[in-house]
Image (cartoon, helix red, strand yellow):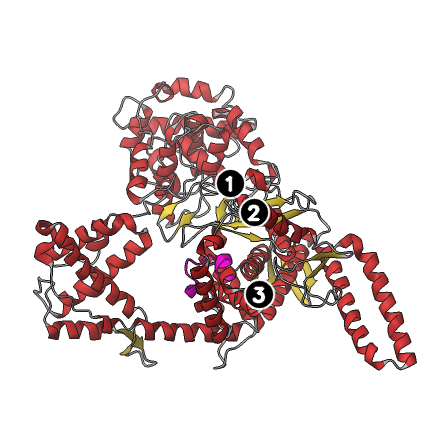
Amino acid sequence: MQLSGEALKAIRGRFVPRPAIEAWPATQHSADDIVARLRGAPLRERVPHTQWCRVTGARQILGWLQTFPGDTWQKRWNASPAAASGQEWCRRATEWVGSTGQVTGPIVSSGLIALVLADVVRPSLEWQLTRRAMQLQDRLPPIRDPDGFARLETLAGPERWASLAGRRALNALIRIMVAKGGTLADITVGDALEYLDVLRAHHSQSAGHTLFYAWLRALGTLPDDAPATLRNLARATGQVSVEQLVDRYHLQCRPVRNLLVDYLKERQPGLDYATLDNISRFLARSFWADLEAHHPGIDSLRLSADVAAQWKQRARTKTERRRRSDGTFYDVVTPRLDAATLMIAVRALYLDLAQWAGEEPARWGSWVAPCPISEADLNIKKTSQRVKARMDQRTRERLPALPTVVRVAKELLDQARLRLDAVREAPAGGRFEVLGEAFTRAQRPGSTWAYDHAGGRRDMAQREHRAFWGWATVEFLQHTGARIEEMLEASHHSLIQYRLPTTGEVVPLLQIAPSKTDQERVLLVSPELADVLSSIITRIRDPRTGTVPQVVAYDYSERVWNPPMPLLFQYDRSGEPSHMTGEFLRKALNDVLEETGLTDASGLPLDFDPHDFRRIFITDAIRSGLPPHIAQVIAGHADINTTMGYNAIYPAEAIEAHRAFIARRRSLRPSEEYRTPTAEEWDAFLGHFERRKLSIGICARAFGTACIHEHACVRCSMLRPEPDQRGRLVEIRDNLLARIIEAEREGWLGELEGLEVSLAGAQDKLAQLDAQQIRRNTVVELGIPTFHDIASRDGTSLLRPK
């Protein structure tokens, strides 16, 4: 279920909190009956002094409340100054209650706890959050709902129950029960939303405070239509109406404002929300609001030549206000990068109105006017060339730096894990050394905080968390060429496998969900990518169930919450599974780049955007001989020109020649080019995978390509050696060493060079196997479905041609 802003508000209106009441059986008892209840089970305290304080304090508070109007103790509490006191209760309770007799602060506090445990008075959520907790975690559960809390503790597990997040969640449930009464099963979605609203009002944020709701869902006490998580209801975010998109710029001319609303509504069915948002910004802010600011009183789309020229000049530039070192400000005018896009949107408005006027003259005819934007004003070709040149330069600078980024990302992860292991092994408050640095562990047991010699504090678990996801981001992007939106949407369901019918070999595949087009695609999972995916799945699996948790992710482009899915890029957010954000992954990537020390041509630190990995992936693939139209399919581009725009190194002559060849082939035999493969052709395709099998591994060359090393497999980078063939590789290496010694002795210098190249290849393959063995000490069952269990959206196979 995807939720818009209006839908979120509707759900909030449906899930309302329980109303505060002032009469229920426990609050209607007499003072003597209440004291008698406090002296019996289960309210009686085991320690005699504590019991005396509870009874004495409760009797004194009840005597004070009797001085206020009301026929129940809750009504008297609400009428007293205590109900609205919050923090004032701690300072003035003795004064208030002491007006009826001598009393001390600890006795008053103990008495109030007794009355809350007995459900005689119910302090509001606001009251509870404006003062320190009343320490009810140990006493209220066995009194109010022993069975419910026992089940909850079992579901949460001992580690989570005792953690800071667990105590925070338990406090939230207790506060709701104190304010509303009842048991855990009586808590509603509305109660949970009300608690978060009050929490945000007092603490400005509620991050990490929604675990209690996940616990309620696990208990099964919430209705079936309850939202999967509270974070998508904590605030009424989401899509807004077209009227709201336009009205955020406060246009003065109402007829033009209404026209823009009608125009955007007319185009809305064919646009995604992000595009609709951008067009509304162009038309309402950058076009009409700008005209109103510089030409007050304007009320027509028919612009004079002078007004149109002035607006186009402003549209091509932007003014930034900067601050000098002495505190004064100055303006800097720079070219506007999206000027062409802005003018296209304005031109589309005028041309659409002219076309629609022929179909509905009464509705659109009065707004038809000459378009102030000519085709010459757009200058799309020159702008595209400039963007292409700028992106090519970025790719050329970053392609040679990619191996360094990959290496540093792995080194940072290894170092972060060593520090985390060291702090966990050190005693609380003890000193330890790791990687040449000395630290002192924090005093709190179980803490992963440590202090260095300069007094700086580090959270080793958080450092390892960022290092892991920085490494995972680099590896995933470089091996898939996916967009960051597609990476964040990758789920456990995206991993599928295809078993060759003849040999039984399993081919792992990664299904990429579309982010810009409506066509999903499938990528072959390389051994390196498989290692990354297995590490991610091992990390995010629920240790109790062995499954990948279902999480709800927010689509920042569409402003909607997606349905729960087992996303790969998720983490434990204060005890509750949460999706990764692009902002966090960019920060983790920046940590890696900062550690590399790389600089660009101007000497500034070299920055990497996640999309740079996509450009590098396409450029490297085409440079390595992959046909551009195949690269287009792998990248998920609807137009091959887009793929060519990403490629920075491939020669222009080869591109044009290949495109001409494709066009000529399509014109000569279009029907044969796109026909269903015959059984022989399909068998030839499957036979390619069968012929990949070698004596010491598997050849990874693409379908339809010849061996470029004349079957000198030991030297070839395409060879993927298998671990069980290590002994055979050792024999080959030893044989090469013996032949090299013989060649040196006999003076066969011509053969010596070739033998040394083969020896280097064999040693490299052995190093690969050793590295794989280190990574695969723990076998990880990915739990991916078979290919035959997976179907595309139209119900057909994703691999076999239709």
Seen from the viewer's position, the closer of residues 785 and 407 is: 785
| First reached walking from the N terminus: tag 1 or tag 3 | 3
Q: Secondary structure at mark 3?
A: loop
Report if the CB atoms under discs 1 and 3 are less than 8 Å apart.
Answer: no
What type is the residue that disc 1 sits on?
Answer: Ala
How packed mark 1 is, by other alpha carbons closer than 10 Å (few <14, some 14-19, many 20 or more), is few
Q: Residue at x 47, y 32 (%)?
A: 216
Q: Percent x, y for residue 443? A: 61, 53
- Which circle, 1 or 2, is nearer the viewer? 2
Report if the CB atoms under discs 2 and 3 are less than 8 Å apart.
Answer: no
Q: Residue at x 60, y 45 (%)?
A: 497
Q: Secondary structure at mark 2?
A: loop
- Which circle, 2 or 3, is nearer the viewer? 2
**Drawn side of residue 482 relative to residue 188, left or right:** right
How packed mark 2 is, by other alpha carbons closer than 10 Å (few <14, some 14-19, many 20 or more), is few
> Which residues are the magenta region?
631-642
Magenta highlight: main SS? helix
Q: Percent x, y for residue 763? A: 78, 67
* Residue picked out by circle 2: 678
Seen from the viewer's position, the closer of residues 86 and 160 is: 160
Seen from the viewer's position, the closer of residues 640 and 386 is: 640
What type is the residue that disc 3 sits on?
Answer: Gly
Q: Residue 791 bears which disc, if any? A: 1
* Residue picked out by circle 3: 455
Q: Percent x, y for residue 495? A: 57, 46
Q: Quadrant of residue 80?
A: top left
User: Can residue 581 be seen here?
Assistant: no
Q: CA distance from mark 1 to mark 3?
A: 57 Å
- Which circle, 1 or 3, is nearer the viewer? 1
Q: CA distance from mark 2 to mark 3?
A: 72 Å
